[in-house]
Every structure is written in C-alpha cells, then in structure tokens.
Amino acid sequence: MEVRVRYAPSPTGLQHIGGIRTALFNYFFARSFGGKFVLRVEDTDRTRYSDEALDDLYGTLDWLGIRWDEGPVVGGPYGPYIQSERYEIYRKYAQQLIDKGMAYYCFCSSERLDDLRREQEDSHSSQQGYDRHCRNLSKEEIQAYLDKGIKPVVRLKVPEEGSTTFHDVLMGDITRENKDISPDPILLKSDGFPTYHLANVIDDHLMHITHILRAQEWIPSGPLHVILYNAFGWEPPVYCHLPMVMGNDGHKLSKRHGSTSVRDFRDKGYLPEAIINYVTLVGWSLDGEKQFFSKYELEKVFSIEKINKAPGVFDYKKLDWFNGQYIREKDDKELAGLLIPYLDRENLLDGMSEDEKLNRVIAIVPLVKDRLKVLSDVCDIARFIFKDPGTPEAKMLCAKGHTPQQELKALEMAYPIIKAGLLEGKADAAIEEELCELAPKLGIKVNGVFMPIRASVTGSQVSPPLFDSIRALGYDDAFKRMERGLEVLGSTSAC
Ligand code: GLU
Ligand code: ZN
C-alpha cells in the first residue's frame, strides 16, 4: 500500500512554526516511504479566509523547498485540492448519510438554539449542546418545513449509547463515551457549505490518505471523525497526533514568546536549512545525539516511531545557533547574495550596480560571517562601511572612565602610528603592539587607546576586529574619520 499523507491548513493566517512542523513531519514521513505528500487547502470557513494567507502558504513551502506531489497548482488524480471547489462533493455525500439514516435535517432556528443554550447555562444542566430536537422528524414534518422554505442544516447522528475508540500511533487507544461527544454536530450548514468535520473526512477518504499526522489539538475531533467514517462505511486512516510545540515556559508557542510565523523568521534572515533542521528536532530525534540534518537526509531517516510523546520546546536561542552554523557553511559569494537584500532594505547599497553590490558585499563577508546570527544582523555590523555614521559625539569616543582630554592625547599619538603602519604594510599584530605600549605611557587603559579609533571609524563602541574594519571601509575614509574624531575631542571639555 502506498503511503499517502496530507498537510491540510486553513488559510486564515500566516504559516505558524507549529503548522510548518506538521507539514515537515508529513513530508518527511511520505518521502521516507517513497509515498505521496498531498497539500489540501481547507478554506471552507469563508469568514476567516484570506488571500494573503494562501499566498503565504505557497510561498513558505516554496521557500523551504517542500514540494507537494498533489495539490493546488500541481493538480493530481483526486483534485480539486481546494475545498471551496468541492462543495458539490460534500453535498452529495451528506445526502448519502441522510439516505442511510446516519444524518438528518435540522430546521431549528438560531433563536431556538440560542434559547436552548441560555437555558442550559442558567440551569447548569449537564446536557450541553444541541438537544436532538429534529432527530426523529417524520417525512411529513420534514416536507412541511421544506415547503415553508426553511433551509435546514444537516446533522450527524452520534450514537447515544456506547463509546467510540480510535487508535493513535503515539498515544495508543483513545476512547470516549458517545454521550460525551458533541450531540449531533452540523455537517452541512443551511447555505449548503460543509463544516470542517464533513469536508475533512470526505477528502481524506477520497484522496486515499493512509496516515493522518496532525496537531494534538485535533484529538477531540478524533472520535467524531471515526463515527463519520463508520457512518459512511469507510475505513479510517492511521492517526498520529503530534505533541504540541511550546515556548520555554510550558505554554503553547505564541507571539508572547517571539516570532511565530515563518515569514517573520524569513524576514529576519533565518535560512530555510536552519528552520527545517531545527523545527524537525522539536519533538523528533534520530538517536538523541545527531543534530545536523539536511532536508535530503531527513527524507531518508525520518520515522514516526521516533517522535517524542512529550511536548516539544521551541528554543529561539537554539535556532539562532543552528542558523549561525548554516550561515558559516555558505561560501562567501552565496552568502553575499543572501545578504544583499537586507542591506538593500536599509538603503545601504544605494547607487551601486548589481555587480558592484556583489563585489562590495563579498569583500565584507569575511568580516561579518562569524558574527551573524541572522542575515539581517549584517546591517548593524557593517553599516559603517556603507554609510558615514556622521560626526560622533565626544561621549562615544571615550572609553569608560576616560576623559576627552585623555582620549584626545591617545588618538593624537595613535593616529600616526596606525596610519604609517597600515600604509607601510606592517602586520596588524605589530601595529597593535605599538598601540598597546601607548597605554602605560599615557597612564590609561589599553581600551582607552583603542576606543577613540574604533568609535571614530565605525561610529560605534562595538565593532568587528578593528583592522579588518578599517580595511573594509578603505584607508582614505578611515583616516578621514579618525581626523574627525580628533576634531571632536579637541573641541570638547567634558563628556
Ligand atoms: N484545516 C485543519 C487545520 O487547519 C486541518 C486539521 C487536520 O489536519 O485534520 O489545521
Ligand atoms: Zn433541530
């Protein structure tokens, strides 16, 4: 039997990191068996649907390099794969259930249902939900309602007695008393549109889905779906509900913890390799040891037996670490290509041709590569190279505990040493040693010698290694900025 799985998101918001983990698990599971990964768009809730969310779904999977074998755009033998294009199918199958006596028309008005809900609340009744008022209407009663032009909903007959069990690969048997299952949920709304339960079950069946890997929050729907499969006389697929993705405080991952949409991560400059690798490790591991996996490897080694039963914790720091590792694996040219959009976004490369951009950015890659957690960090690290930080404030030029007078003297002595040293092509270490020797002579700390140089050149008290920074900027500009630093310090009395 061919393994067929699906990712079935509702396009109501941006792709969430937890949703993408579900997609990845499905994708890798399918690949590991040489099976099919189906994408299905569950867009029957038209009030929450958004075009942006649908674009984001396609864009995100594309960016991650996750291709679906069947689904929207690519098609397939069991399409259409967008639920809003399948309404006729759902109506036909709902009718089938009515004909079999497994579902029925309900004509209750929303007023009646509201009253019912209020009564149940007021009396703290143990009976919650629909009271099955229309479950046993006679043919004549039904016809009378229809003749009046009242549009019914279709409800599922949930058995009143007994219990329903379904098996979950990770959780084992899950059993619920039928009396505790939502009494006769709506399958087809009065406008003829299906609810999630009906559309989901019909599609999984018609699309020959063999395994359902989805978030644990769908467990409560499990018994209902099994009842639906039974009502149709269909075999339910194998279930594997995936443990939640949590923040480090034990709560479900949400905006409170940080970015949750893949688009946010992408904008900040996380690499798809890092997202795929790390997100797959949230709740799955091969042997508890190996950490680095390419997509290609995961397609081979992924298995649901190794999914953790406990919720997975999403650790932002760990993702940063993975991202840094993948950044450092890039060769300079490829990394430059990835950095350019971020520098462009902050107008740091304005006025350059594409070739110039590439050459300039390749030249700074060695300076930034080891320091990037995310690609967008390049702007803060390398801004001084592409944009004059402007005349610095005296305070910026002074190391902690040093006066402008001390720093002026330091820079006056350091500047000629650096300038001569660099122009003569002396080794960095040799120049550095000379500069260090200034400190005891001036009665200041070594930091006091370097700070006015660094801050003049970069406009910041923290920067990549000083000499590399100067070279990346170019000697002429660097010298001019140091001279400007001298002027600032010369005309300042106190910080
Ligand atoms: N459309 C549902 C969702 O948004 C699908 C749930 C399922 O996989 O059955 O997650
Ligand atoms: Zn009713």
Image (cartoon, rainbow, N blue to C red):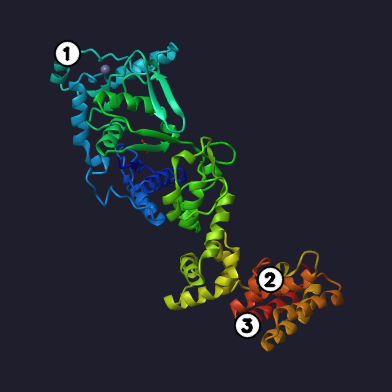
The residue shown at (82%, 77%) is: 437
In the displayed structure image, the side of residue 215 where residue 457 appears, left or right: right
Disc 3 residue crowd, few under 14, some 14–19, many 20+, Cα 10 Å:
some
Where is residue 208 drawn, in percent x and y?
Answer: 27, 38
* Whether residue 271 is situated above or below residue 253 in the rendered picture: below
**How busy is the neighbourhood of tag 1: few (under 14 within 10 Å), some, or many (20 plus)?**
few
Earlier in the chain: of badge 2 and badge 1, it is 1
The label on residue 475 is 3
Q: CA distance from mark 2 to mark 1?
A: 86 Å
Direction from residue 122 to residue 86 in the image, left or right: left
Judged by depth in the image, the label closer to the viewer, 2 or 1, is 1
Tell me the kind of residue under disc 3.
Tyr
Looking at the rendered structure, the number of numbered marks drawn on it comes to 3
Q: Quadrant of the N terminus?
A: top left
Give the secondary structure at mark 1.
helix
Whether the residues at callouts 3 and 2 have beta carbons within 8 Å, the answer is no
Q: Position of residue 226 (x, y in %)?
A: 33, 26
> According to the image, label 2 marks what residue?
455
Quadrant where the C terminus sits is bottom right
Measure how far apart labels 1 and 3 are at the Cα level: 93 Å
Give the residue at x 51% y 69%.
331
Residue 295 place in picture, x, y as percent: 44, 54
The vertical placement of 172 against 210, above or below, is above
Mark 1 vs mark 3: which is more N-terminal?
1
For the point 19% across and 20% down, the residue is 100
* Badge 3 element: helix
Residue 493 in sight in this render:
no
Residue picked out by circle 1 = 141
Instruction: Report the amino acid beneath label 1.
Output: Glu
Residue in the image at 46% along x and 43% along y: 18
* Nearer to us: label 3 or label 2: 3
Q: How much space separates mark 3 and mark 2, taking CA atoms? A: 15 Å
